[in-house]
Image (cartoon, rainbow, N blue to C red):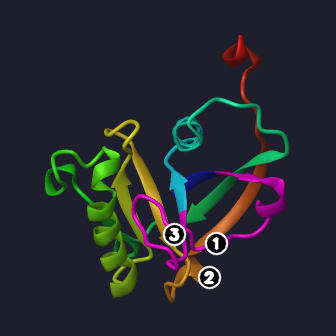
Amino acid sequence: MEVYRISHKDYSKVLSSAGSSNRWNYEGEYVIYTGSSRSLSTLELIVHRNSIKKLPDYEMMILSIADEDNLMEQILIKKLPANWRSFTSYFKLQKIGSAWYKKQSSLVLKVPSAVIPKEYNYIINTKHPTFNTNVLLVRNEEYFFDERLFE
């Protein structure tokens, strides 16, 4: 399976995580957030930055994850709080993601996108024992926003 991540060129050549907290993890939990498509990854970046801005020196990272059922768990929307997409639910989602991270039951957590709930993001646990053998940075592509977005 291929997944996508947008990153500054300084950080796009290796698979690593700063351990910063986000929607599905606490500070100090080393995960990589990826999207199911280039377009979803772009929308996630826009929402995360709260604007559309030209991003010089960014690249699209294409990652390959082994297609083995035991490597992935999925969070279903019906199991989430009613307001799971709102910022006020971050602490609830972080608790879910942190439990998954600590349990080490799978390499990848498939979660619904808060931007487009019928699409998915894939959170990769870089500390999982199978990370180095099942996740590969396949290539990097030039990344840009279409100029018409700024008109």
Q: Which residue is mark 2?
A: 132
Query: In the visual, does 90 lie left or right of 123?
Result: left
Magenta-colored span: 6-32
Q: Is residue 104 visible?
A: no
Q: Name the residue that disc number 3 marks.
A: 66
Query: Quick check: marks 2 and 3 in contact, CB under 8 Å?
Result: no
Residue type at mark 2: give it: Asn
Q: Which is nearer the N-term, disc 1 or disc 2?
A: 1
First in sequence: mark 2 vs mark 3: 3
Query: Residue at 22% of width from left, 55% of height from top?
Result: 76
For the question of whether residue 57 can be seen, the reply is: yes
Q: Secondary structure at mark 3?
A: loop
Residue 31: x percent and y percent? 53, 71
Compare residues 83 and 97 and report the one nearer the observer: 83
Residue at point 70%, 64% (across, down): 137
Residue 1, how many percent across, how many down? 51, 57
In the rendered image, which residue does mark 1 sit on?
Answer: 18
